[in-house]
Amino acid sequence: MKIIIAVILLVLAIGLSGCQTFALKQKEKKAALREKTKAQPREENTDVDFQAFIGRLRKAVAAHDVKTLSTMMTDDFGYRLNPEASGNGVFQYWDGEGLWPELQGILSEEFVQKGAYMVAPPQFADESLNYDGYRAGVRRVNGSWKFAYFVSG
């Protein structure tokens, strides 16, 4: 009888020693999460004022807050390439064409440098891709970030 109990305890000890402890599992999960976070794209411009501007811009677009958006845009904001249109009429154009969801999607993309502008999506900045979809651009005007265009084509 003692031999049977000893064998059972020995089998349990060997089986349990092969299992990971809870703390070790948590440590591995945290390491995997860190690796996953490193792999995700980040905004190329990490300036605090740029990040704050993009955050406010995304919130204003999600809320369709035209009053806030109008203060964040350049006076010659471009909203159509063919035929060219800029300045007043942008919000009516977005409403009429149902572009708010598209704008929100583009602004959720990573912004990268292209000339004097920070643009989204990043595919637009890569000349080899010949990207001709919707794109957004922001630039510095008198030391402040401004939403300069949202166009397609």
Image (tube, rainbow, N blue to C red):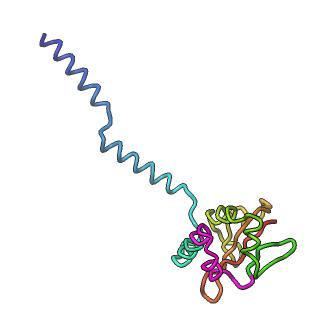
Left-right relation of 100 to 23: right
Predominant secondary structure, magenta span:
helix
Left-right relation of 94 to 48: right
Viewer-proximal residue among 24 and 150: 150
In magenta, the rendered stretch is: 58-76
**Does the segment drawn in magenta span residue 142?**
no
The residue under the point 69% across, 76% down is 117
In the rendered image, the vertical position of residue 5 relative to residue 133, given as above or below: above
The residue under the point 30% across, 44% down is 23
Give the residue furthest to the bottom.
Answer: 142
In the rendered image, the vertical position of residue 58 relative to residue 15, given as above or below: below
- How far across and down, in percent of the image, does residue 32 sit? 45, 48
Q: Quadrant of residue 41?
A: bottom right
**Does the segment drawn in magenta span residue 66?**
yes
Which quadrant does the C terminus fall into?
Answer: bottom right
Which quadrant does the N terminus fall into?
Answer: top left
In the rendered image, the vertical position of residue 69 relative to residue 44, given as above or below: below
The residue under the point 35% across, 47% down is 27
Viewer-proximal residue among 53 and 36: 53
Give the residue furthest to the top.
Answer: 1
- How far across and down, in percent of the image, does residue 36 sit? 50, 52
